Image: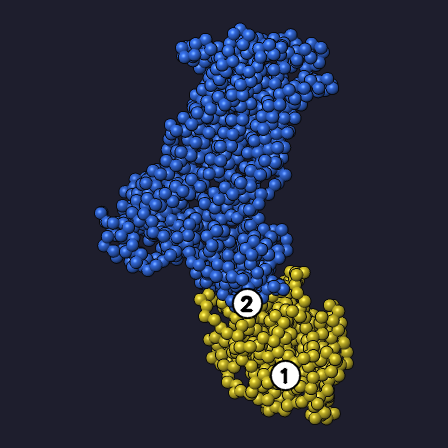
Chain colours: A yellow, B blue
Amino acid sequence: MRHIAIRWRTFGLICVLLSGCDDGSLPPTTTTTTSPPPASAVETMAGGDTAGYRAAIEPREFIFPSDHGPHPDFRSEWWYFTGHLESDDGERFGYQLTFFRQALAPQAQTRSSSWATRQLYLAHFALTDVEADVFHSFERLSRGAAGLAGAGGNRPFRVWVEDWSAESIGVEAFPLRLRATSRESPTIALDLTLEKHKPVVLQGDRGLSQKGEGAGDASYYYSLTRIAARGTIRLGDRSVPVTGISWLDREWSTSALGKGQIGWDWFSIQLDDQRELMLFQLRRADGSIDPISHGVLVAVDGSTRSLRYQDYSIEVTATWRSRHGTVYPSGWLLNIPTASLALELAPLVADQELDVSFRYWEGAVSVGGTENDKPVRGLGYVELVGYAE
Amino acid sequence: MTPLLRRASFRHLVRHPWLIGLSVLGVAVAVAVVVGIDLANASAKRAFQLSVEGIAGRATHEIVGGPVGLRESVYVDLRVQGLRNISPIVEATVAAADDSGRTFQLLGIDLFVDPQLRSFTPRFDNSGDPAAFLTRPGGTYLGRELAQQLNLAPGDHLEIRAAGVQRELEVIGLLAPPDQLSRQALRDLLIVDISSAQEILEKEGYLSRIDLILPTDNTLAKREAELATQLPAGVELQSKSARAGALDQMTRAFRLNLSALSLLALLVGMFLIYNTMTFSVVQRRALIGTLRALGVTRRQVFSLIAAEALVIGATGSALGIAAGIVLAQGLLTLVAQTINDLYFAVSVTSVVIPTSGWLKGALLGVGGTLLACLKPASEATSAPPRQVLARSELEQKARREVTQAAAIGSGLLLMSAVLVALPSKNLVLSFAALFLFVIGFAALVPSATLGMLRLLKTPMRHGFGLLGVMATRGVATTLSRTGVAIAALVIAVSVTIGVGVMVASFRSTLIEWLEITLAADIYVAPADPGSRGGAKTLDPTMLWTIEADPRVAFASTIRRVRVNSPLGPVLVGALKTEKLGFTAYRFAQGDPDDAWQRFQHEEAAIISESFAYHKDLQIGSTVELSTDRGPETFEVAGVYYDYGSDQGVVTMSRATYNRYWDDPAIFSIGIFTQPGVDRERLIEDLRGRLGLQENVRWVSNRDLREASLEIFDRTFVITEVLRLLAVVVAFIGVLTALMALQLERAREFGVLRASGLTPRQVWGLVTAQCGLMGWVAGVLSLPLGSGLAVLLIHIINRRSFGWTLQMELPLMVLLQALALALGAALMAGLYPAFRLSRASPALALREE
């Protein structure tokens, strides 16, 4: 999913440009009073002008490992890692490490300076410490040039923003190493080796995920729904060896959004029985859900079953008010009658709002419920965008 | 003070408007010169500080590399290793392409990190478009004020010249400075993306520096040391304040010299006030005697005179401060021009008026006036009433004092000599010696005047008969007034001699030096004028074509760069030449043949005289420099004369330079032709072969000499202006002194007229006396002026800049001085002569 993300994430980039924040931890004090209202910012960069970029119009053949790399002719692209980790002592953690690419111009120019670029890279790193009930989030932004940030290159899988990176260890895309370190005190860091456990899942129609009415109002979207993770996290002076599971979402697109959409709720669920579920719903200003919303259920063998909007329902069971006054949903009931699944989702930590240059909630959740009255359990990640002012 | 006294004082002032008016004017001009120079200096310094601080933003440190900057990978590595709060910068001074002479600072930044260090660098703005800024080559943000000045709006284009090449910038957006410091910084900044900056300046792969913030707490030293170890050889971490301090230090001597010259003008002004006050006391001796006889106390008389001085001083100072502010605007342009020519780019357009600036002027004006009135006031009060009434008594006393003054003067001269002899480089001490010398000499003037008058008596009698004798005697017998007037004239005229001789000596030294040093026949250099230190360079491959021509005997190349050293920034010259080119250097220390051998084969350097002087170095000393390979020491093989830089230069062979620095660039080429070659033809052929390069200038050594002298003359404009201002003060002084003197003698002339002197003869007598005084002053100013010149050249200049100048006493300057003294004196006599000759004797006698 995350087509809509184009707008919101683009807006995020603008916010960063606007505040000039180097790190998410820095207060955005530099936002000047001369700043325009956000709408004009969105218009300036995200607004309409998609001319010259390639668009996701029809299903395409995905080729790996090259499709793990960047697609610079599309306007936006991301590499989205989320996962759940556990220490030997049973301490539980959630993490998110996301890399965004945003093109600023449709055509590359021949320039002699290695700093010249038309690509921006933004990265978010978050760690949820369940036992301590604490959430940390950080941000990096850089030009995709001069070796500061970028994707592709000499490895089958490589994307990095300064000292945060996801890159293949060997000649194959996997195993993959994720690294991110906050440079603030206390140090929060992540160093994981990821092994692919299930094949690539092509979302939507053979990887073409339609988001709006028009042709090209779509993205290319694939996921790796079950990845084994092993490594270390660092919390201040403490190094904690961890193991766990991860999820990778890859998506690239160009076109803007449908009218009236204000945000979305996105769910990725990894059930203990080795099945996975992805669902999203696009929320509209009038409170309704856009019927183009969809999802997928991945079987143990990796085979998939598409879920249409009418195949599932999502009921909010609790809310949480952030310290910025934003009210987010904070508990859900997912019903998928066609699969006989009824799942109850609860955040592992209530406050998992990323307080970076644009605010959203992305957090680890516990999953419990029934399938044909038999209990099922699992872990998940939920993304809530468009609630914050 | 009683109303009676106040009225008496007021009446006196009102009755002598000319005298008072000129005194006020004299104080005003002197104060104006001091305030003007002070404000111009302060403004230049402040503008420089503000632009350094403003551009530095919150950055506390910078990481710098060698002559061509540092490799961009240094930054990328630090950043990717996780260092925060650092910002890469590519910058240079560029010029407007319209030949307006306007310069800008082109600042290449990375938008994603720079706003963390600087509050004014581009951020998202209504009129801005960061995407365009990042992706369009030459996309530029600039401050609103600058845009208004240049009449630019977003979307407009701006042509600039960078490294000799014309480039086009596109205005992407305008920046509103968030505070005053940013406003200053933005005044001449053109902010481009770092990629554009590299391309415009042809610095691909390199950064000018990396700005960074280190927390200034007790971990600073540790962090500095830690970071320094992460940097490759030839790349250094330095604090911003250290760099600003080093730059400020460069211009300190220059500014101090200007201040001292302005104080000389004040000194002349003080003599003028002294003269006026003495005169006004002398003139009222009868009144003062009467008042004292009537019971007015000494203290009251003293206060009366002090109050008058205060009024003159305060009025003059107020006018002077106002005029000084106006004057500062003009002087500032000259100061900034000189700093630009000699040191670094500084853009100053407005005068800042710190309280200290005008306060100093007021203190000097009022204080100086009070100081100057001290002696006349105490003289008027110290004598018993009966004596004050007697004019003859006063003159006798003046005669006695001549001897005293001579003794004091000799003492001051001795002190001056002691100060000069002290083995110190302290400039303040040097200026103290200079002032002691001037005041000491002035104290000798009365006795010297008497001596000269004795000598002149006979020629005057033969030349002008009785009137001649009368004139001579007249000057001598009124020494209480003429003495001071002549001293003021001597000082004023000698200042013009001293400064004039200094500039002339400097110029002739420079001409001679250029003659010898510019040994090559043809010079090739980047076309942009005013490029210091080789910011612009030539394509080194040009040399191949030049050397291939059979008419070329050989070509030498020079590259000058500023590199860091433990002694601060040092100008390093890389010289490739043959022995013939090398021996064109004139050595102050060392044998040219020996120095050549060691220069060629032992990696030894030769250093310029000013460098040797400032850093206390001689042959055999070593100089440590930061090279691309890390710190290296170079031995000194010789010390040569160089008047190109007052900071000094360390010159090494190109081969040595190439071993320690990765910088193939050359700044200029000197072509030594075979004998009998047609130079014009050769230039034409070489230019043809190398293709049309409009950014390269080909000049004969004669033209280059002329161009160098042109810059020299430009940098001395301000000195000349100061000299002229001193002349103006002097002129006003003489005018006041002599005019008052002659007018006071109305009664004497009345008697003479009554005794049968014709108006014409009175005219002649007044003129003769004035001429005589002018002549005496002119002649006496010659030794003082020459002495001043010696001090300026061998002490002040040497200690300020480390240069040895060959002193030259141009006859012209001396004749000018005589003419000035004589002319001013004669002119001063015009009005009194006119009035006295026309006055009816009866009226004049009624003055009694």
Camera sees residue B446 = no
Residue type at tag 2: Ala
Residue B4, image x, y percentages? 73, 17
**For numbered disc 1, what is the local secondary structure?**
loop
Q: Residue at x 60, y 20 (%)?
A: B277
Residue A207, image x, y percentages? 57, 86
Instruction: Tell me the residue that label 2 is attached to.
Output: B132
Q: Quadrant of the N terminus of chain B?
A: top right
The residue lying toward the viewer, choosing from A64 and B480, is B480
The residue lying toward the viewer, choosing from B534 and B387, is B387
- Give above or below for B221 relative to A102: above
Please say if the residues under marks 1 and 2 sit with CB atoms less than 8 Å apart: no
Quarter of the image where one finds residue A358: bottom right
Q: Residue at x 75, y 83 (%)?
A: A315
Measured Cα–Cα span from mark 1 to mark 2: 29 Å
Q: How many marks?
A: 2
Instruction: Tell me the residue that label 1 is attached to.
Output: A211
B744 displayed left or right of A129: left
- Give above or below for B839 relative to B162: above
The 10 Å Cα crowd at callout 1, few under 14, some 14 to 19, many 20 or more, is: many
Q: Residue at x 56, y 30 (%)?
A: B30
Camera sees residue A325 = yes
Residue B472, image x, y percentages? 47, 12
B577 displayed left or right of A91: left
Circle nearer the viewer, 1 or 2? 2
Residue A96, image x, y percentages? 62, 74
Residue type at tag 1: Lys
Q: Chain of mark 2?
A: B
Quarter of the image where one finds residue B776: top left
